[in-house]
Image (cartoon, rainbow, N blue to C red):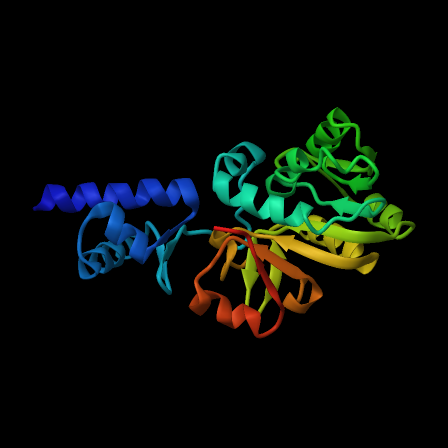
Amino acid sequence: MKVLTEERQQAIIKQLNRDGIVKLQELVQTLDCSISTVRRDLQELEDQGKLVRVHGGATQITTLQSEPGVLEKSSKNVQAKQKIAKLAVQQIRADEVIYLDAGTSTEAMIPFMTTLSSVLVVTNGVQLASKLADINVKTYLLGGELKNTTKAIIGADVVETIKNFRFNRAFMGVNGVHPKYGFTTPDPNEAAVKRAVLAQSELGYFLADKSKLNELSFAKVAELGAGVLLTDEHDKEVLQEFDQTKRIMEAEK
């Protein structure tokens, strides 16, 4: 019986490392065991310091300054990011000026933008600019300090340049979405860039898969009411506390 317990818990950790979050009901199905057994496993794993239990499941342990690199981010929640990215691109209209924040969630939008050649894109993402050029979308790449881990251009020069632009829509990535503390990210410099963009945008969108909900990072970007949350989450109980402050747009299942 001990071996079975270890196997279940290893499977839980493996899924957690892959997706960043595990849902109680999904684990019951994939592990073919009772809900009480899964709850016990999650409790034991939390006692061992391997995860943090949340309503309806568990998330990875993170610190306020935790920030995965691009390679690590790009391998997680791929299908969820694609669903959210498709929904995000559906909001864009012909001839608009849009801002794409550096990040893997916004980068996932680019394959869906091949028919939007009439738009103008401003970005602080080096990888995004290259991929936009590949599909012949007119792109402005902001200049400043290159942050190696996220491949984002940051710094005071970027913030000042952004003040000279106006955007119809801005699409942002974030590390945490919290009902009390809003949208957050680990790096104050990246948060400053995001805030500057929001101030110049008619409408802001935050792309966050369900692993980001109820998470919190060091630097605040904005209150929930500052933008529309695009997410793949469908659990109405989970979304209720967010829905009280800002409309939620959900990607199709």
Q: Is residue 24 left or right of residue 159?
A: left
Residue 114 position, x and y percent, is 72, 33
Residue sitting farthest toward the bottom: 244
Q: Residue furthest right?
A: 164
Camera-side residue of 23 and 194: 23
| Residue drawn at 74 percent across, 48 percent down | 92
Against 86, is 135 above or below? Answer: above
Residue 216 placement, left or right of 44: right
- Relative placement, left or right, of 103 versus 14 is right
Question: Is residue 219 visible in the rendered structure shown here?
Answer: no
Residue 245 in the image: x percent, y percent? 61, 73
Asked if residue 180 is positioned above or below residue 14 in the image, the reply reads below
Q: Residue at x 75, y 51 (%)?
A: 170
Q: Residue at x 77, y 53 (%)?
A: 169
Nearer to the camera, 234 or 20: 234
> Residue 103, how many percent across, how many down?
64, 41
Asked whether residue 176 appears in the rendered view, the answer is: yes
For residue 201, side relative to residue 225 (left or right): right
Residue 210: image location, x then y, percent? 48, 54
Residue at 62 percent across and 67 percent down: it is 247
Query: Looking at the picture, does residue 81 appear above or below residue 130?
Result: below
Q: Quadrant for residue 143, please give it.
A: top right
- Residue 226 location, quadrant: bottom right
